[in-house]
Amino acid sequence: MKKEIVTRFPPSPTGYLHVGGARTALFNWLYARRSGGRFVLRIEDTDLKRSTRESVDAIFEAMAWLGIDWDEGPYFQSERFDIYKEYVATLVASGHAYHCDCPPEKVEEMRQKGLAAGGKAKYDGTCREKGLPGGEGTAIRFKAPLTGTTVIEDRVKGNIVFQNADLDDFVIARSDGTPTYNFVVVVDDITMGINTIIRGDDHVSNTPKQILLYKALGAELPVFAHVPMVLGKDKTRLSKRHGAMSVTEYKRMGFLPDAFINYLVRLGWSYGDQEFFTRNELVEKFNLENIGKSAGVFDPEKLTALNADHIKAAPPERLIPHLMPFLQEKGVQADDAAYLVKVIQTLNARSKTLVEMAESALFYYQDAIAYDEAALKKTFTPDAAAPMRQLIHELEALEDFSEKALEGAFLKVMELTGLKLGKIAQPVRVALTGRTASPGIFEIIEILGKEAVLKRLDAAVRIIEGKK
């Protein structure tokens, strides 16, 4: 019987969810979803001073926006200290861990001595065989093997071999009783049944210690897959200057969650030459074999271009809940969903972000048009009034406001004035939208409707003719 895949995402709530963390969450979520397995959320909040509820809430908000749901959790490490104490006691009792009363300054001396001798900065094992009984002020160290090798059988990087002689007897519980990162991670993964660990390759150096802990506790090793880091365009570690903000900031900037996860997955994973993926395609196709060995480079311009593709491809109805907050920010309620669908259909091929789309949609909802000053000067010239008046006359006579009927009205004005379509349409465009660039003129007129169009054209004629 095939074993159920169980993956996890364990963020530390000391800040917002950023690009690298979101990609890790996504890889684990996709792998669990594709295999029909389970995805576990664990909040690693053992750093009680730096962990905040605000950060926890921000992580939840970001994951909700990305559409990354979990099957178990959220578990909080801060609520699991009793479990960690039991496992510490188990390792001490089995001889795999021991009490150490070396003060921090003495341990630092040992580390410096090791470096000076051309070796590793490590604890020298002073208390290893003392058999100290423990008590206040003593830490507990894991008794690492002194010879041999520890091998990570990594699904991305291949086998990575560590010499045990280079490892030291690392602390699993501090002198104040609090457990350390590498220890609690292993206890959590064992007790939560995690059997597949996909994480950034900055964790590779932690993995041999964790493997030793698994073996000492008699637990089966999980599958490890260490994913290359995400870099900026200058190939340095991703930071704010590269555009690496919190995930929720991209939401505020008008990116679609499906576009964002599409881009994140492609930062380190490929499927032939395909760039555009729907969420369902990612779930169907994601695997560990196609994770690359080289770092992904975060390029905000490529993300924006991919976002434009997703906006264009999405059914307008599905864009409504994503667009609405941006319209509301601009004072637009857009209560008529059918009307908004028509509006989106004219803008989705021209909008890179939802912020752009909301800005471009404003003229559809304004009672009084806000004219662009340059557009006004360029198109509202004295000779534009007569053709516009003629167009008003033709439109007033129309019962049918379909595109074909509107085209006929414009042709009639062209015949009567001898002007080409552009000379008539451009002032009309500015009269209706306030700008020289907009969706197709017939589309706009049809959506706005007869009353609004005539009102706007009449206002434009009054401006041209200098009337108040």
Image: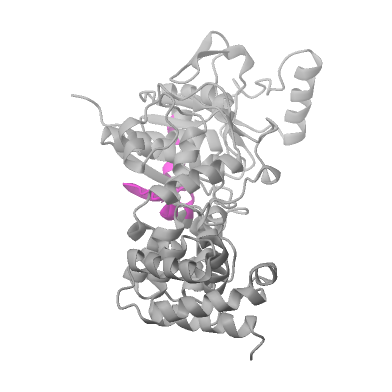
Q: Residue at position x 41%, y 82% from top?
A: 451
The image shows residue 160 at horizontal and vertical percentages of: 53, 14
The image shows residue 284 at horizontal and vertical percentages of: 30, 34
The image shows residue 31 at horizontal and vertical percentages of: 35, 33
**Is 366 above or below relative to 250?**
below
Q: Residue at position x 58%, y 27% from top?
A: 295
- Residue found at the very far left of the displayed protein: 1
Quarter of the picture containing the N terminus is: top left
Among the 4 quarters of the image, the one containing residue 252: bottom right
The image shows residue 467 at horizontal and vertical percentages of: 64, 89
Colouring chosen for the image of the structure: one colour
Q: Is residue 303 visible?
A: yes
Q: Who is closer to the viewer here, 34 or 242?
A: 242
- Residue found at the very far right of the displayed protein: 116
How many numbered marks are there?
0
64 within the magenta span: yes
Q: Who is closer to the viewer here, 392 or 283?
A: 392
Among the 4 quarters of the image, the one containing residue 282: top left
Query: In this image, 283 relative to 9: left or right?
Result: left
Q: Residue at position x 36%, y 41% from top?
A: 278
- Residue found at the very far bottom of the displayed protein: 468
Magenta stretch: give its range: 62-90
**Is 214 above or below relative to 240?**
above
Give the main secondary structure of the magenta stretch.
helix
Among the 4 quarters of the image, the one containing residue 460: bottom right
Q: Who is closer to the viewer here, 238 or 254?
A: 254
Quarter of the picture containing the C terminus is: bottom right
63 within the magenta span: yes
Q: Who is closer to the viewer here, 14 or 210?
A: 14
Q: Is residue 355 visible?
A: no
